[in-house]
Image: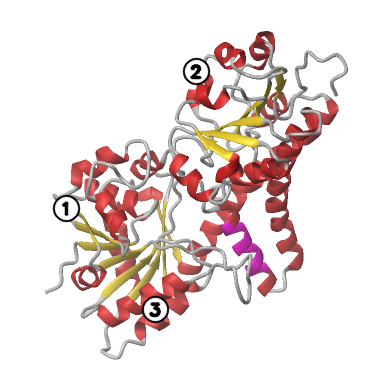
Amino acid sequence: MENKKSILCIGAGYVGGPTMAMIAAKCPDYTVTVADINADRIARWNSDSLPIYEPGLYDVVKQARGRNLFFTTDVEQGIRNAYLIFVSVNTPTKTFGAGAGKAADLQYWEKCARLIAETADSTKIVVEKSTLPVRAAEAIHRILQSNPRGIEFHVLSNPEFLAEGTAIRDLENPDRVLIGSMTVPDSHEAMQTLVDLYAHWVPRERILTTNVWSSEMSKLVSNAMLAQRISSINSISALCERTGADVSEVSRAVSMDSRIGSKFLRPGVGFGGSCFKKDILNLVYLCEQYNLDAVAKYWEQVVLMNDYQERRFAERIVKAMFNTLSGKRIALFGFAFKADTGDTRESPAIYISRMLIEEHAKLAIHDPQALPNARLDMKGYEDCIEYCEDPYEAARGAHAIAIITDWHAFTELDYQRLYDSMEKPAFLFDGRNILDHRKLFEIGFEVYPLGKAKLSHMVHSR
């Protein structure tokens, strides 16, 4: 008799690992296995040095690991043992063929579906945890049902809404859990199985059930809406710099309108991460496939505005520093796409760094967690970059500091000490508006906030 309280997750990355750790911690009566073909990644999940940095994650893993949470490279055995199979593999943007640059590349998901169909020896519930385009579940279901042994599969959509840096808090106290099911026989029973799992700790009113298409669409639209807010305030930051308005004051005034609120209205150098850009481009492609060209262009503009903000930040550095960076040392504080994570996927730091290097700058990069990933992202630029564990070492001899990531630690540095060690005039470009700009100016910095007037000691500075 199959064990209906046996769970497998295929994929031990940023979503699969933390999500399964929380399920195991909250549901001690379930056995949870996380499988991945990357042996090094699995070894780290089984060690004290986890493969990803996320506040609170280690404590959750330690609570359940070896009790009812296990990590393995044996995917096939995991499939045979499990009743619930979550699939959380990478779905990057296609770089080739039809839809290149916009559509999701589903090759890894299809390989998983075929492996499940070939290996399973009993009924399984397969759960989409990766972000997939609308109507992907239909194709996955066809692949699974084509197995020659007549084994029945149910496909559910259960998109993740985690924010890196707060993923454990998001998992423990989610705004909502969304579960979508197909309109096929017994789909309601399969959906109820997943509802019962989450109901161990999530209030029932926060568990939303929909059809599978609405669930898939909701994930794309959620990320598109959040990214839209970021691009909106970033566009206003450019206007504020030209008009003398202060984007922080504008943002505060706007956000006090209860209809708007304050979330995602802080200007920055641009959004990053594995989801926002990919999901918007996926949405754009979907609109184009249904000949909704005006809708596609509307959402594509969110990405174009993000590209503009990254480019604008780099160009402002060049212009402020007398239109030449040749041979100048620029200290980049932060490389992760946001604070409290080591993830650098689609980080604005990657594109800003490349733009500065094109101007022949020498970079000194410091980040509390992301330096290993920064080295991978900037492979081939070793002659132009120094990676510094110590922010004071990064700033020594630098002509400028650029704040790229909003790490709280950057607000606690001794900026007088940093200033004293730098070339003069010493520039500071705050791409996150997290510092005390007046105090920096009084120390002696040429201060360039985002969306605000610069503070300069140079009489004829523009």
Side of 13 where 316 appears, left or right: right
Residue 105 seen in the figure: yes
Q: Secondary structure at mark 3?
A: loop
| Image position of 269 with respect to 248: above or below | below
Of the image marks 2 and 1, the number of the one nearer the N terminus: 1
State which quarter of the image contains the N terminus.
bottom left
Task: Please name the colour scheme applied to the rendered image.
Answer: secondary structure
The residue labelled by disc 1 is 68
Side of 88 where 336 appears, left or right: right
The residue labelled by disc 3 is 184
The residue labelled by disc 2 is 412
When asked about the image quadrant of residue 334, the answer is top right
* Residue range highlighted in magenta: 278-287
Residue 348, horizontal then vertical, whole percent: 61, 43
Amino acid at circle 3 = Val
Residue 391: mark in rendering: none
The residue at 57%/39% (across/down) is: 385
- Say few, some or many: other residues with alpha carbon within 10 Å of mark 1 (under 14 / 14 to 19 / 20 or more): some
Q: Is residue 139 magenta?
A: no
